[in-house]
Image: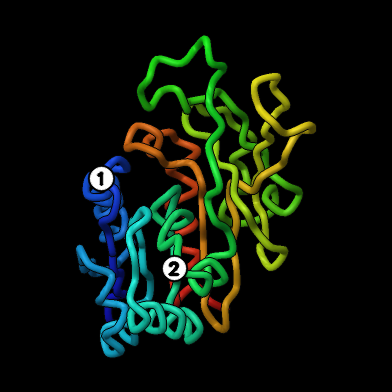
C-alpha cells in the first residue's frame, strides 16, 4: 500500500509562527504513515496533479491572499475528497477577501475579545482570556473529541461567524462584560467538522501559539482531526 500524502501549506502573518507550529505535527503525520510535503505558498493549490495526489492538506496561513486559480484548485480538491484541516487563524482567518473560501471553511474569525481596560498592558496578552471549551452532545460521541471532556485555556478566545452546515463538536461562550458592547452571552463554535462533496474539513479555533498547541486536549483534538479529515478516512 502506498503512503498517504499530506501537504502542509503555511505562511501569512508571522505572529502565529506558522513554521514552528506546523513543524510540531510533522513527526505525528509521518508516524501515521504520511509522506509530508511542505509549501510556503498557497499557489500549490492550483496544481491539479499535486492536489489529486494529496490525501490531507494542513493549512496554516493567517490573513494573506489567494489567487482565483489557487482557490478554485483548493475547492475542487476538497470536493473530490482531499481532506483539509487547521487551527486558529491559519484556517479560520485566512483570505479575508474571499467569500468562496469562507463558504468552504464554514467559519470566519470576527474578533478575540480583550481583557478589561485596566488589565491591559499593550501587548498580545491583552487578548488572552481564561475560558472553557465545552463539548457538545455530538462532540462527546465523535471520534475526534470522545473521552476528552471540557477543558480550560488561557489564550485568545475566538468569536467566529459560522453557518449550520458545520457539525460543531465544541463551543465556547463569550460572557457579557461592562466594557464590551454586546448584551447577552454569545456561544461560538470552537471545534467543528464540515463535509464538502466527498471531502472532509476539520477546524479548531484554539492554537494561537505553539504553547497552546502543546496543551494535551488541543493537541489530541488536532491530531485526531487531521486523521479524520484525511481522504483515506472518508466513508
Viewer-side residue, 56 vs 131: 131
Residue at (48, 55) in percent of width and height: 92
Q: How is the image coloured?
A: rainbow
Location of residue 176 in the rendering, given as x and y in whole percent from the top left corner: 73, 26
Report the quarter where the C terminus lies.
Answer: bottom right
On the image, numbered disc 1 is attached to which residue?
A: 14
Q: Is residue 38 visible?
A: no
Q: In the displayed structure, does residue 24 sit left or right of residue 78? A: left
Location of residue 219 in the rendering, given as x and y in whole percent from the top left corner: 42, 43
Which mark is drawn over residue 203?
none
Residue at (44, 51) in percent of width and height: 87
Q: Residues within 10 Å of mark 2 (few under 14, many from 20)?
A: many
**Quadrant in the picture for residue 134:** top right
Furthest-right residue in this view: 184
On the image, numbered disc 2 is attached to which residue?
A: 84
Location of residue 13 in the rendering, given as x and y in whole percent from the top left corner: 29, 49
Determine whether 56 is above or below 162 in the image. below
Residue at (51, 50) in percent of width and height: 204
Per the image, label 1 sits on a secondary structure element best described as helix
Q: Earlier in the sequence, mark 2 or mark 1?
A: 1
Q: In the displayed structure, does residue 202 sit left or right of residue 223? A: right
Per the image, label 2 sits on a secondary structure element best described as strand
Location of residue 43 in the rendering, given as x and y in whole percent from the top left corner: 26, 75
Amino acid at each position: 500500500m502506498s503512503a498517504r500524502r499530506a501537504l502542509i501549506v503555511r505562511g501569512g502573518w508571522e505572529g502565529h509562527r506558522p513554521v514552528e507550529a506546523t513543524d510540531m505535527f510533522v513527526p505525528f503525520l509521518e508516524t501515521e504513515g504520511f509522506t509530508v510535503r511542505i509549501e510556503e505558498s498557497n499557489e500549490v493549490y492550483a496544481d491539479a496533479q499535486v492536489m489529486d495526489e494529496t490525501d490531507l492538506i494542513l493549512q496554516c496561513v493567517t490573513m494573506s491572499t489567494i489567487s482565483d486559480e489557487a482557490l478554485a484548485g483548493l475547492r475542487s480538491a476538497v470536493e473530490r475528497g482531499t481532506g483539509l484541516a487547521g487551527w486558529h487563524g491559519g484556517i479560520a482567518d485566512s483570505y479575508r477577501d474571499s467569500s468562496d473560501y469562507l463558504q468552504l471553511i464554514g467559519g470566519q474569525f470576527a474578533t478575540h475579545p480583550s481583557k478589561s481596560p485596566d488589565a491591559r498592558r499593550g501587548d498580545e496578552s491583552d487578548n488572552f482570556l481564561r475560558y472553557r471549551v465545552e463539548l457538545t452532545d455530538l462532540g462527546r460521541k465523535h471520534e475526534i473529541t470522545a473521552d476528552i471532556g471540557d477543558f480550560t485555556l488561557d489564550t485568545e478566545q475566538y468569536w467566529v461567524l459560522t453557518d449550520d452546515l458545520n457539525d460543531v463538536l465544541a463551543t465556547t461562550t463569550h460572557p457579557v462584560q461592562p466594557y464590551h458592547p454586546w448584551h447577552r452571552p454569545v456561544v461560538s463554535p470552537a471545534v467543528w467538522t464540515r463535509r464538502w462533496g466527498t471531502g472532509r474539513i476539520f477546524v479548531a479555533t484554539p492554537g494561537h501559539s505553539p504553547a497552546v498547541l502543546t496543551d494535551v486536549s488541543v493537541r489530541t483534538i488536532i491530531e485526531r482531526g487531521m486523521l479524520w479529515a484525511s481522504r483515506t478516512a472518508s466513508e
